[in-house]
Image (cartoon, rainbow, N blue to C red):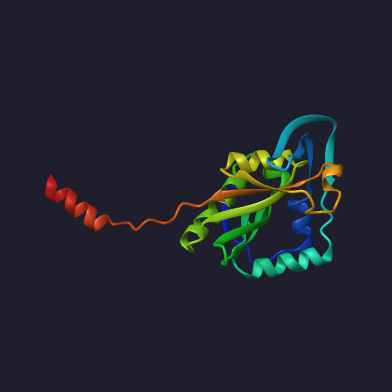
Amino acid sequence: MTSIRIKTLDRLTHEDLARLVDGYVSDSVYRVKKTDDGNRIAIHLRRTRIRPPYTKVFPHPAGELRKYREVVKQGWSLGAYDGTELVGLALAEPRHWNRSVWVWEIGVAPSHRRRGIGRRLIAGLARRARKAGLRVLVCETQTTNVPAIDFYRKVGFVMEGVDFSYYSNEDLEKGEVAIFMKLRVPASRPSGRSGTGARRRASE
């Protein structure tokens, strides 16, 4: 078995996007409820198992591919390679006005899932963000995409936002609501090795 290399993604084809970010099947959804009595606003999300499972296929129209190719040109996106084969990707771009990194897409080939590749892609983005002085990774997914939510939570993201009209004016009625998840990136610390080491040696 060859080792998987993570490196900067320098090109993106429609075939790769369709193969690695193809959609999802979920046997659970988060039901969303909002209450507002004028004094207290509350948003509740409750995980619920469903039958049959919810299935969504991502179409990836030409306009989206053009946008993502521009994102790739910025040099922040990562690819996971098994030899020369692209088996995973994370499309991302910095937003310097609020020191964040927006993660547009992350995907791994079915043949290479459950091998820690997604975790390594997120870790790679976090390292780049830290070196650049950026503070948080941000992604958007849907209340129907519980596998993605579980993955993001497993690698350290927390749910921090809900948008009831991100896709349409009927998102709540349709049961597919946008949620925003964030992973805070610890700031880089000066090494301070020489001074700390000198003090330690002087006191020993």
Q: Of 35 and 83, which appears nearest the observer?
A: 35
Compared with residue 121, is residue 146 higher up or lower down, i.e. above or below? above
Quarter of the N terminus within the rendering: top right
Compared with residue 188, is residue 119 higher up or lower down, i.e. above or below? above
Residue 187 coordinates in the image, percent (x, y): 44, 55
Name which quarter of the figure residue 69 lies in.
bottom right
Residue 59 visible in the current orientation: yes
Residue at the extreme front of the image, as rendered? 39
Decide if residue 200 is on the left or right side of residue 149: left
- The residue lying at 60 percent from left, 49 percent from top is 182
Compared with residue 42, is residue 123 higher up or lower down, i.e. above or below? below
Residue 103 coordinates in the image, percent (x, y): 64, 56
Name which quarter of the figure residue 151 lies in.
top right
Quarter of the C terminus within the rendering: top left
Residue 81 visible in the current orientation: no
- The residue lying at 69 percent from left, 51 percent from top is 140
Q: Of 141 and 197, which appears nearest the observer?
A: 141
Residue 6 coordinates in the image, percent (x, y): 57, 55
Residue 170 coordinates in the image, percent (x, y): 86, 49
